[in-house]
Image (cartoon, rainbow, N blue to C red):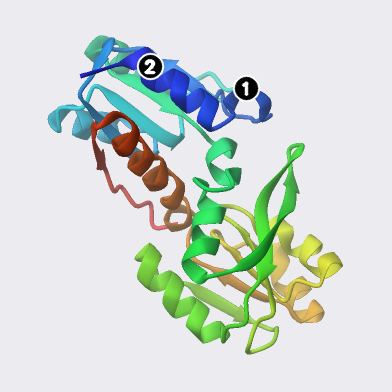
Amino acid sequence: MVKRNTITRFLRKELDISSIPDASVNGVQVAGNPEVKKIAISVDASIRLFETAKKEGCQMILVHHGVKWKGQVNDIRNKRLEWLKKNRITLFAAHLPIDIHPTLGNNAGIAGSLGMKKLSKFGFYHGVYAGFYGRLSMPIRSIKRSLDRSLKTSSVVQGYGPKITKKVGIISGGGAFGIHECRRLGIDTLITGEEFHTTYHFAEECGINVVYAGHYATETVGVKLVAKLLEEKFNIETIFIDIPTGQ
């Protein structure tokens, strides 16, 4: 068993929760049992996730998309919070902090899996840079194969850029907004999650590849990296609960 507060303090510091502006209320959203033996890791908070975590014997849940968002209050949110309180399960959320972390983040993890070099910050969003770009010489078809294999996804390629990439940008999830920075920075290929209608013709006319690897799939990376760190740091059991959304 590990003290809940020991784990949450470590996460807040490691993920730099307090210094990153976000629409998500990051950190502890519900404080449950003060002792933690097992932690569930997932992308999205939901009643199905909570029930699965309880069946798996977890006292704590770490998610990318939590329950509390600034300015959002509704009956579903309240139902989720009440369920967690009743069952004494801690919920810790980290949205942008898990996207942008230089070693534990979604984008850093994807960049590492592709072997990208000389990473720089990229993708200005809500006052921070959400992604990274760097050097990568690889056929676009090989990038698709690598992403499909590592993320267990089926990427969609909008191939209007070079067949062999030189400079690649990554913004997980709904990061198609980065296409405009790609043009300014000379990035020939953007890897993101969710397809966005208004980027289609812009990418074509600018000669930029866009690889859509799935909003959900691209955001499984960071929580898994954090889980590995927690296992090493606290010798605690974690379990990734896979609830894909098809997006």
Q: Amino acid at mark 1?
A: Ser
Along the line of sight, which residue is nearer the eye, 6 or 244?
Answer: 6
Image coordinates for residue 154, horizontal then vertical, percent: 41, 71
In the rendered image, is residue 135 in sight? yes
Q: Closest to the observer: 120 or 210?
A: 120
Q: Residue at x 62, y 22 (%)?
A: 18
Location of mark 1 (residue): 18
Residue at the spot 80% in from the left edge and 62% down from the top edge: 180
Residue assigned mark 2: 6
Amino acid type, label 2: Thr
Q: Are marks 1 and 2 in contact (CB under 8 Å)?
A: no
Q: Is residue 7 left or right of residue 103?
A: left
Residue appearing at x 74%, y 64% in the figure: 179
x, y percentage for residue 144? 48, 77
Mark before the other along the chain sequence, 1 or 2: 2
Specify the quadrant of the image occupied by residue 35: top left
